[in-house]
Amino acid sequence: MTDITSIDAVQKMLGDQGYICGRDLGTVVFLSLRLGRPLFLEGEAGVGKTEIAKALAAGLNRKLIRLQCYEGLDASSAVYEWNFPAQMVAIRAAEAAGAADSAALTADLFSDKYLIERPLLEAMRPDENGAPILLIDELDRTDAPFEAFLLEALSDFQVTIPEMGTIKAPEPPIVILTSNRTREVHDALKRRCLYHWVDYPGFDREMDILNARAPEAAENLSREVVAFVQQLRTEDLFKKPGVAETIDWAKCLLALDVITLSPEVIADTLGAILKYQDDIAKLHGSEAKRILDQARASLEPA
């Protein structure tokens, strides 16, 4: 990270990977890298929290290790497990061969040969390119016991395997945690991290993002797409479209050779930006035209 000496350098590095961020986000990413502190990102789904980790990994040429959280995730599933089928084969082979040294067999069974590394353990291992990026994605899907385990793991950057002992990272991984805020994450874990709320971007930044991710889109179409999505976010929807949906929608329109938006085109492609039937139903009929008219009006010079 010798080239990352300023906030501007962070923004440029992320921008080179197609991730356009403001100075506030660039600042907290820079401080996370400089101070070696985990970065906790909250925000609505689809605003680009996960993409930050991907862009960092690409920009720093580091390995990206992703721990996708889910309800019921426990420490053992996140750290390691033993390859039981292979161990059973080894035991039967030893019995068939008449092996009598049980201590040697036990030592062999609980060695690296049969160890399946899960993301947290993998992130503790040395890497020739430097410490990896550890993405702990959608932490809000887990429960309090797993948070408590993470609190210890992120404090010492080490994990314990009863059969092998404690494994400590020679260089702490670069840790990014994300949450869609479906529930509150405990303050004790947040205090271990630098925090940033990733919000929906304004018009200009969303245009920059779309130009970076779908450069083949014509300027006029891109402006209409972004203005429509920005207007759509002001509506009473169950799930507002994120930046990811803006990009997906633009690519769908390009695939259909659409030059400009129309109520008919919007109705045909709503599944790219809205993911709930109730939300889609609200835009049938004259609603799509109303929002499109408002979006176009916002593009007109004052």
Image (cartoon, grey):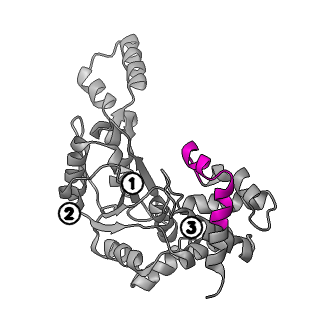
Residue, x 75% and y 73% (percent of image)?
A: 218
Q: CA distance from mark 1 to mark 2?
A: 18 Å
Residue 19 locus on image (x, y percent): 53, 71
Left or right: 160 as drawn, with respect to 283:
left
Q: Secondary structure at mark 2?
A: helix
Q: Residue furthest bottom?
A: 302
Q: Is residue 74 at all visible to an observer of this figure?
A: yes
- Inspect the magenta stretch and tell me whether residue 293 lies in it: no
State which mark lies toward you, 3 or 1. Answer: 3
Q: In the image, is 89 to the left or to the right of 271?
A: left
Q: Quadrant of the N terminus?
A: bottom left
Q: Relative to the observer, which residue lies in front, 197 or 17?
A: 197
14 and 196: which is toward the camera: 196
Q: Which mark is residue 55?
A: none
Q: Which residue is mark 2?
A: 191
Q: Nearer the viewer, mark 1 or mark 2?
A: 1
Q: Quadrant of residue 292?
A: bottom right
Q: Nearer the viewer, mark 2 or mark 3?
A: 3
The disc label shown at residue 180, or none: 1
Say which amino acid is labelled 2.
Arg
Location of residue 35 in the rendering, given as x and y in whole percent from the top left corner: 27, 74
Q: Residue at x 39, y 85 (%)?
A: 6
Residue occupying image coordinates x 33% and y 16%: 99
* SS assignment at label 1: loop
Which numbered disc flags the more N-terminal residue, 2 or 3?
A: 2
Is 33 above or below relative to 86? below
Dot 1 or dot 2, earlier in sequence: 1
What number of labels is visible?
Answer: 3
Determine whether the residue tagged by mark 3 lies in a helix, strand or loop. helix
